[in-house]
Image (tube, grey):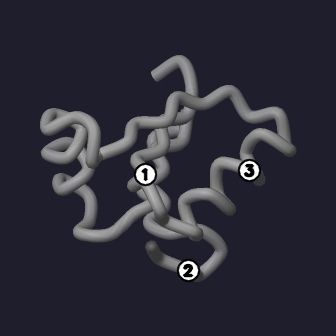
Amino acid sequence: MSKVIIYTLRNCPTCDKATAALNERRVDFEERRVDENAVWWDEALNYAYTVPVILWENGDVEIGWEGEHG
């Protein structure tokens, strides 16, 4: 994986916080809005039933952001 992938949902304040923090930290990431793409929805469901789901470059998976879930 060349960069971080974050699965988000429109109108999700926690997702907005996560993407803003990643931008602020200058993390190269690809945002995948699960409500806009059925394939991304299925991919995210492999990890959790909530968003955000963050796939880090080292293979770690983070569910939520700083203790919050969307």
Going from N to C along the chain, the mark reached first, 2 or 3, is 3
Across and down, in percent, residue 8 comes to 43, 51
User: Which amino acid type corresponds to the residue marked 3 in the rendered image?
Assistant: Ala
Q: Tag 3's secondary structure?
A: helix
Question: How busy is the neighbourhood of tag 3: few (under 14 within 10 Å), some, or many (20 plus)?
Answer: few
Q: Disc count in the image?
A: 3
- Closer to us: 2 or 58: 2
Taking 64 as reference, is 56 above or below it? Answer: above
Going from N to C along the chain, the mark reached first, 3 or 1, is 1
Across and down, in percent, residue 68 comes to 56, 80
Tag 2 residue:
68
- Closer to us: 42 or 34: 34
Across and down, in percent, residue 42 comes to 14, 45
Tag 1 residue:
8
| Marker disc for residue 46 | none
Frontmost of labels 2 and 3 is: 3
Going from N to C along the chain, the mark reached first, 2 or 1, is 1
- Closer to us: 19 or 54: 19
8 horizontally vs 4: left or right: left
| Marker disc for residue 20 | 3
User: Which amino acid type corresponds to the residue marked 2 in the rendered image?
Assistant: Glu
Q: Tag 1's secondary structure?
A: strand
For the point 26% across and 58% down, which residue is it? 47
